[in-house]
Amino acid sequence: MGVEELVASLGDNILTTTMGKLIGWGRGNSVWPAQFGLACCAIEMIATATAGVDIARFGSEAFRASPRQSDLMIVSGRVSQKMAPVLRTVYDQMPEPKWVISVGAGSSTSGDFNNYALLQGVDKIVPVDVYIPGCPPRPEDLLNALMILQERIKAQGIVPLP
């Protein structure tokens, strides 16, 4: 029996499956966001860090000002054409694996502001993992999106980096 056949017969063995679950659990429960607040939705995003909403119970209380220390970008508010390259640069500076939450109708589709100066959705320049509808959405909606993202991260386990 060759090495390839042996590896194929083992499939997901106990060690890699358990390690994958452990790594997924660790990543999912310690997501550190980089806030990218651009408009009124940013006020609702900031409210998630208050004692009333308490994003800290999800392991995401450490809002980072540096993209090099974060793995989640929360884009809240409409993105102007001039701000789009800056947003992409910040996203590129984040270490892998990284995720994006689009907060509100402004960042998802530019909302009521359909004109040449605004990007018609942040997903035109960065991949978005979770969209939150509303103008502006409530802080509880951001917590719900974070819980959805955590479940997706936990399910990934060990993901090879690109």
Image (spheres, rainbow, N blue to C red):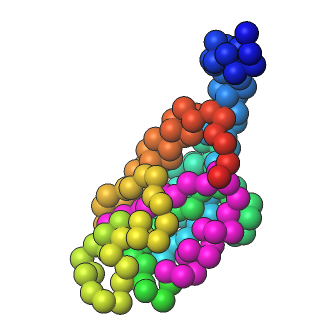
Residue plotted at (51% across, 35% down): 151
For the record, the magenta segment spans 84-106
- Residue 118: x and y in percent read 36, 84
Residue 22, located in which quarter of the rendered image? top right
Residue 102, located in which quarter of the rendered image? bottom left
Quadrant location of the N terminus?
Answer: top right
Residue plotted at (56% across, 74% down): 88
Q: Is residue 61 above or below residue 158?
A: below
Q: Nearer the viewer, residue 149 or 37?
A: 149
- Residue 108: x and y in percent read 35, 66
Q: Is residue 46 above or below residue 111?
A: above
Residue plotted at (64% across, 12% down): 9
Q: Nearer the viewer, residue 36 or 21?
A: 21
- Residue 109: x and y in percent read 31, 69
Residue 160, located in which quarter of the rendered image? top right
Residue plotted at (58% across, 49% down): 55
Q: Is residue 97 above or below residue 91?
A: above
**Magenta run includes residue 130:** no
- Residue 85: x and y in percent read 54, 82
**Magenta run includes residue 93:** yes
Tell me how many marks there are. 0
Asked if residue 64 shows in the view, the reply is no
